[in-house]
Image (cartoon, rainbow, N blue to C red):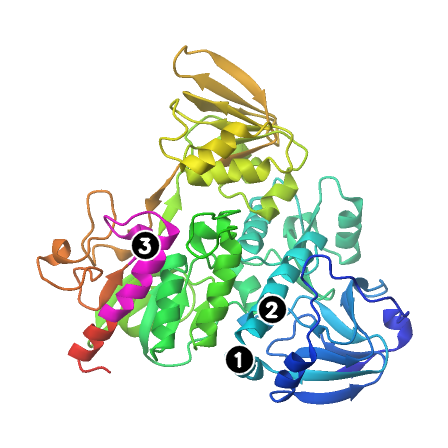
Amino acid sequence: MSTNSSSELEMADLPETPDTTGAYPRLNDEQILLLSQHGERKVLAEGTTLFCAGDRDCGVFVVLDGKVRVVQEEGPGGEARVIAVHGRGRFVGDLSMLTGQAVYVTAVAQTDVEVLEVLYDGIKEAVTQDQALGDLILRAFLLRRNLHAGLGAGLRIIGSRYSADTRRLRDFASRNRIPYRWEDLEDDLDAEATLRALDIPPDQTPVVIWKARTVLRNPSNTELAELLGLRAAPSRSAYDLVVVGAGPGGLAAAVYAASEGLSTVVLDALATGGQAATSSQIENYLGFPAGISGAELADRAVVQARKFGAAFSIPGEATSLTHADGYHVVGLAEGEDLVAHAVVVATGVRYRRLDVPGLDRLERSSVYYAATEFEARLCQQDPVTVVGGGNSAGQAACFLARRSPVVNLVIRHDDLGRDMSRYLADRVEQSPRIKIWRCSEVSELIGHEALEEVVLHDLRTDAKQRVATTAMFVLIGATPYTSWLDGQIALDAKGFILTGPVADGSEGGMFETSRPGVFAVGDVRSGSVKRVASAVGEGSVAIRQVHRFLEAEGRR
């Protein structure tokens, strides 16, 4: 903790931020008493920093007296932007405190305060005694992350909308639910002024500014992840289990493996959550009658797995699977190879692209393969086009219709209910903002540097029509991500992983591949049901088979 002068942070006495969304709940006396058994009371002077953007492994602070201000640092000479002010009974913290990542905001004592600092282990102990308290804290942190994302608190990404690397960094931040503010060099004069002040030439963009001081010039995803604490360094020479892929199946495997005492590390080439994390609302998942976003489901699973001791390394792209000295070795694109007694492959699928004129030119600026809150903000109040007839396309169309005046949904057949759940198809057909183009396909993208129109081809009449649109969302299915296995385990004709008796003719577990000790779950497995609930079930059940394998090999 440190003390800053009032001139640095303008410590005016602002009123407490009202809790209109549930992001800033107030703890009752019983909850505070429980947390006090696992924390430390501190009296801090006005201006003291409780935690700073970039800090890791810091505690949650419960305000017992006085006020604490949460701010976004805006850089040397600039005023700190106020995010929220908390008074007695409120707790100050961020989702990163539960995931082990760097926090994105700074907390400062607005007045002389008395606070209760509770470190991560103390939080874990407290919530085992009061489940409602754990749910309250986690829910608040998830809502705060969404608020911070909407405010652009966190990273600053400065780059051109036409730059492939700018798009790469924005996609990486979006998929990992990292709050950021994008400043487009094409139309933001302040962005140009910032680069001039930092003496950064255009050929060194995009740049990422972190904590208002640290500047990364066109960083790789790995460099950015290491800065934010997304990548965990290997903590042992050999793990009980390496989970490759952090979609619902991989996350479920991690939760069950870690909770049952297996040393577990989870890899993913891009982000936790897989394709499910791009879903704006999953309404048919057991236990969530009001629905849950894929991002929230993923964040909850990460917190749960980490609570039991699982480690995460994002990005961690698996490039090979070999066998040495009785162990499985997962080769990585960057960093040390991982050695394990067993491996669960849950790499899922990769998105399919449209093969149409104009895509290569406009893809990086105007074509998306997910429709999350981040993408929706980029095209609000503009017409958009969604290509696809499955649940992902239907969910995307409904979600985008909240912001866009016209959503064109393009399907190649005439029956919306053929590949889409009936409740969702009904919702799409009833939406006044969604226009369904049946028996149609996108045949061309038109625009100079950004998408302006798509050409729709009617498959029945052969007629073509130009339709105004500023963004296209392509959700037409995917192919299994198994190229990295390079003949190490048996695949079916379409590249999905064969498991069970069909894999090697044995009577082994249904999720074991042709190589003993290597298991496959979720969408990447041949014959699997491509649903979130199915992947979660497979990931959890597969761990029972992992245990049997380890016991048979004398490794438990």
Residue depicted at 47% across the width and 32% down the height: 426
Is 499 left, or right, of 49 in this rendering? left
Amino acid type assigned to the residue bearing label 2 in the image: Leu
Q: Position of residue 487 (x, y in %)?
A: 21, 55
Q: Position of residue 307 (x, y in %)?
A: 47, 75
Earlier residue among tags 1 and 3: 1
Is 493 left, or right, of 118 in this rendering? left
Distance, label 3 to label 2, CA atoms, is 30 Å
Task: Confirm whether residue 108 shows in the render.
Answer: yes
Q: Position of residue 55 (x, y in %)?
A: 65, 75
Q: Position of residue 72 (x, y in %)?
A: 75, 64
- Was residue 531 drawn as part of the magenta stretch in this picture? yes
Task: Confirm whether residue 358 shows in the render.
Answer: no
Residue depicted at 74% across the width and 83% down the height: 115
The mark found on residue 124 in the picture is: 1
Is 76 left, or right, of 374 in this rendering? right
Check whether the beta carbons of the residues at disc 1 and disc 2 lie within 8 A of each other. no
Amino acid type assigned to the residue bearing label 3 in the image: Gly
Comparing 522 with 350, the one in front is: 522
Q: Main secondary structure of the magenta part?
A: helix
Amino acid type assigned to the residue bearing label 1 in the image: Lys
Q: Which residue is mark 3?
A: 522
Secondary structure of residue under mark 3: helix
Q: From the image, which quarter does the C terminus lie in?
A: bottom left
* Of the two numbered discs 1 and 2 in the rendering, the one whose residue sits closer to the viewer: 2
Comparing 13 with 487, the one in front is: 13
Secondary structure of residue under mark 2: helix
Distance, label 1 to label 3, CA atoms, is 29 Å
Check whether the beta carbons of the residues at disc 1 and disc 3 lie within 8 A of each other. no
In the image, the segment drawn in magenta is: 521-545
Q: Which residue is mark 2?
A: 136
Q: From the image, which quarter does the N terminus lie in?
A: bottom right
